[in-house]
Image (cartoon, rainbow, N blue to C red):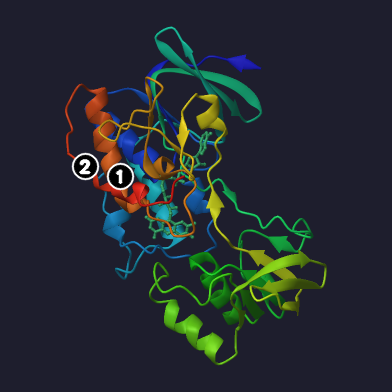
């Protein structure tokens, strides 16, 4: 079924923090807009493990000048932040359509048509301009080894309770893997960690996790294999191969592969946005955030493509995109010789 809702000046694709922040800024500038979100409000944060805490301070992840307050001034959890985002949407009465995935964007005269799948219906939105605030963590990375599709293997830590008393192998060595290892240890799981690096990296790991994980590994309460990678998963075990060639078999009942996330390029490609470098980030003008397709902009962590395991583009360094886009759409000027956020994405390895 196809229907055509009213035209808006701007369509924002993505109802994450940057998409919502842009919505408030457009509202304040008197520009009509519609937000289309593939899942729930703040969908990326919604799939974090329950009670995961932000690394960033609250003032750096608050949006649209709405204070993000926690009762004890601590960094917000996933739940507190989702609560906050719902509050922002209600406070500004933002027009957002959830569970509506934009699949392609086509030019139709002076307008852009967004072909979307909304609750199993095909809906075509039209707008003069489109902002892709689609993030960069659409899917979890996979190992590409036999057995990865078995039901006891998961790329997300969804909750902790089910792991009580179970032997769990966690693959990865950055925040998601380290946090999962600690939390599952504390719910009474027998945790083994496998990381391809020589140790838990000190840079970029939440500072409150590092001493604890290192202490638990040192005292043998969490078993850890470094310089190694999984080769095969079976119902009862995982074969690990060390970089020196040694093979180790670890018995386990559950496997968590927490090795990072990737950006789905489908929409960018379907819209004709050029993708560049190893991270396949969208091409855009850093002054205006407009891509190579006239009228299509990009904002938020979407600008960095698929980031390596050492993330450099975060919500906290993306707020600036909103001001640039609003300035460009309203005929204003926003000039800064070299935007700070370009240093971060250009620091990523690109071929
Ligand atoms: C465990 C974890 C902890 C993190 N901690 C921090 C931290 O401390 N500080 C920090 O700054 N960052 C952190 N991040 C990264 C954080 O998730 C991002 O910085 C933040 O979500 C980026 O906001 P965004 O609006 O750019 O993108 P997102 O929040 O990813 O929002 C993009 C939205 O677009 C939607 N979307 C995608 N494709 C489509 C489509 N085709 N049609 C419609 N909608 C679509 C998605 O469903 C999503 O809701 C963390 C990430 C993880 C996984």
Q: Quadrant of residue 299?
A: top left
Quarter holding residue 2: top right
From the viewer's perspective, is 115 left or right of 277?
A: right
Q: Is residue 219 above or below residue 103?
A: below
Q: Position of residue 129 (x, y in %)?
A: 37, 21
Marks 1 and 2 close (CB-CB < 8 Å): yes
Residue 8 circle label: none
Residue 50 percent across, percent down from the top left: 53, 63
Q: Mark 1 points at which residue?
A: 342
Q: Is residue 6 visible?
A: no
Identify the residue under disc 2. Answer: 338
Name which residue lies at 47% across and 51% down: 307
Residue placed most toward the observer, 63 or 87: 63
Residue 312 place in picture, x, y as percent: 38, 55
The N terminus - image quarter:
top right
What residue is rendered at 45% in x and 16% in y?
Answer: 112
User: x%, y% of residue 74?
Assistant: 33, 69
Which residue, as the protein is rendered here, is positioned at the far right? 235
């Amino acid at each position: 079924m196809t229907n055509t809702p009213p035209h808006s000046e701007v369509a924002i694709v993505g109802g994450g923090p940057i998409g919502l922040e842009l919505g408030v800024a457009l509202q304040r500038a008197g520009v009509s807009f519609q937000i289309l979100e593939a899942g729930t409000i703040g969908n990326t944060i919604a799939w974090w493990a329950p009670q995961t805490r932000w690394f960033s301070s609250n003032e750096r992840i608050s949006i649209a000048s709405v204070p993000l307050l926690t009762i004890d001034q601590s960094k917000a959890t996933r739940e507190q932040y989702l609560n906050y985002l719902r509050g922002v949407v209600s406070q500004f009465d933002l027009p957002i359509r959830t569970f509506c995935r934009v699949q392609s964007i086509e030019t139709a005269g002076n307008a852009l048509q967004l072909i979307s799948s909304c609750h199993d219906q095909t809906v075509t939105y039209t707008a003069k301009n489109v902002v892709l605030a689609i993030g960069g963590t659409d899917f979890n990375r996979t190992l590409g080894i036999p057995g990865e599709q078995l039901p006891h293997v998961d790329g997300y830590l969804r909750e902790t309770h089910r792991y009580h008393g179970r032997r769990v192998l966690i693959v990865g060595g950055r925040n998601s893997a380290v946090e999962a290892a600690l939390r599952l240890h504390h719910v009474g799981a027998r945790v083994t960690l496998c990381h391809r690096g020589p140790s838990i990296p000190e840079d970029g790991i939440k500072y409150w996790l590092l001493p604890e994980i290192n202490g638990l590994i040192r005292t043998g309460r969490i078993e850890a294999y470094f310089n190694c990678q999984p080769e095969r998963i079976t119902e009862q075990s995982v074969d690990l191969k060390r970089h020196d060639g040694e093979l180790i078999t670890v018995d386990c009942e559950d496997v968590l592969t927490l090795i990072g996330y990737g950006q789905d390029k489908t929409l960018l490609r379907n819209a004709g946005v050029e993708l560049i470098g190893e991270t396949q980030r969208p091409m855009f003008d850093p002054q205006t955030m407009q891509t190579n397709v006239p009228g299509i902009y990009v904002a938020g962590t979407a600008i960095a493509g698929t980031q390596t395991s050492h993330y450099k583009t975060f919500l906290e360094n993306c707020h600036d995109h909103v001001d640039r886009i609003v300035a460009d759409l309203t005929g204003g000027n926003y000039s800064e010789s070299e935007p700070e956020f370009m240093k971060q994405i250009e620091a990523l390895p690109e071929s």
